[in-house]
Amino acid sequence: MGPRPQRRWVLAAAASLACAAALADAPRATLVVCAPGSPGTTDEAQGAMDAFAAAVAAKAGLPAGSLTAIYEPGEDAGVARLRAPDAAVALVSLPFFLKHEKELGLRPELQAVPQGGAGTERWGLVARKGRVTGPAGLDGFTIYSTAGYAPAFVRGPALGGFGSLPPSVKITQSSAVLSALRRAVAGEPVAVLLDGAQQAALPSLPFAADLEVVTRSPPLPAGVVAPVNKRLPPARWAKVSTALRELSGEPAGAEALAGIRMTRFEPVDGAAVSAARAAYAEASR
């Protein structure tokens, strides 16, 4: 026979108290946001990061202050911050994830849905209209992109379906995509790889009629949420993961998400990540 009803209640209460005590004693965990090429500085973003972390912690039932968040706009700074012992969760762009997942022990679990977008996006290569009709037409070109710090992402997941790029193609990281597009219109050997949000703004440019999207990638996650190197115990990660997925369902959570320009978080598209990982590995050879 099992324990009597009163004893079962006592055991359940004891387990609940033990769980609460463990959470209270847990070291502080940091959620690190990094999407190289995105605007803003760490200091400028900190207010929104604090509000986001507080909303997630409250939704997850974690003690106040036990979860913090920080934004790092640069690749090197993001990698360094994710190596710190308290860095437990990463919210990063797909190029960053593919380049650093192994060294940082990242495991993709969720994907971010940015404001005005979807959980997946298609990157597009933009050039002067009629200038590039195939990969060979990029001979001697420079491709500018916020993802230029990860050349294997550009050649693989983003443009692998277009065909092999000529060896002479130079891939350069730049956030100044508007000036790069102007150079392309002016006739320079320049093309620009844009993410989904940047492409959405393309028709508003006064010289948009002189540009064309030459090719687009398959749908790829816009941003990846990944536990870092198993630093969060499974039970605690389960609470954080559930909180992230449910955050948009209440006004305070939706407001915190809007502060970091997100609509919600959803389960990661595992097939899309696997395909992108394979294309990245092929392009890295």
Image (tube, rainbow, N blue to C red):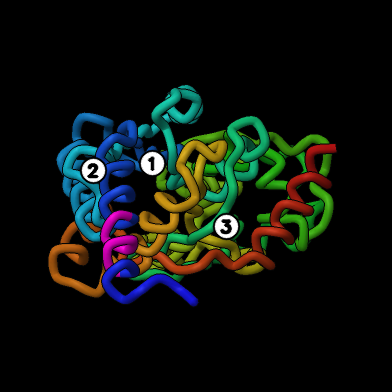
The quadrant in which residue 242 appears is: bottom left
Which residue appears at 77% of the width and 62% of the height? 161
Per the rendered image, the range of residues in magenta is 9-14
Q: CA distance from mark 2 to mark 3?
A: 33 Å
Say which amino acid is labelled 2. Met
Residue placed under numbered mark 3 in the picture: 126
Q: Position of residue 265 (x, y in %)?
A: 39, 64
Sequence-first tag of 2 and 1: 1
Which label is found at residue 33? 1
Q: Specify the amino acid type for callout 1.
A: Val
- CA–CA distance in space, label 3 to label 1: 28 Å
Q: Tell me whether circle 2 and circle 3 mark residues in contact (CB < 8 Å).
A: no
Q: Residues within 10 Å of mark 1 (few under 14, many from 20)?
A: many
Left or right: residue 159 compared with residue 168: left
Q: Residue 136: where, in percent of width, then height?
A: 82, 52
Question: What residue did someone put label 2 on?
Answer: 49
3D distance between C-alphas at marks 2 and 1: 9 Å
Q: Earlier in the sequence, mark 2 or mark 3?
A: 2
Q: How many marks?
A: 3
Q: Main secondary structure of the magenta part?
A: helix
Q: Quadrant of the C terminus?
A: top right
Residue 269 on the magenta span: no
**46 lies left or right of 90:** left
- Is residue 122 visible in the rendered structure shown here? yes
Quadrant in which residue 167 is drawn: top right
Name the residue nearer the viewer: 240 or 155: 240
**Image coords of residue 248 (percent x, y):** 26, 70
Q: Amino acid at mark 3?
A: Val
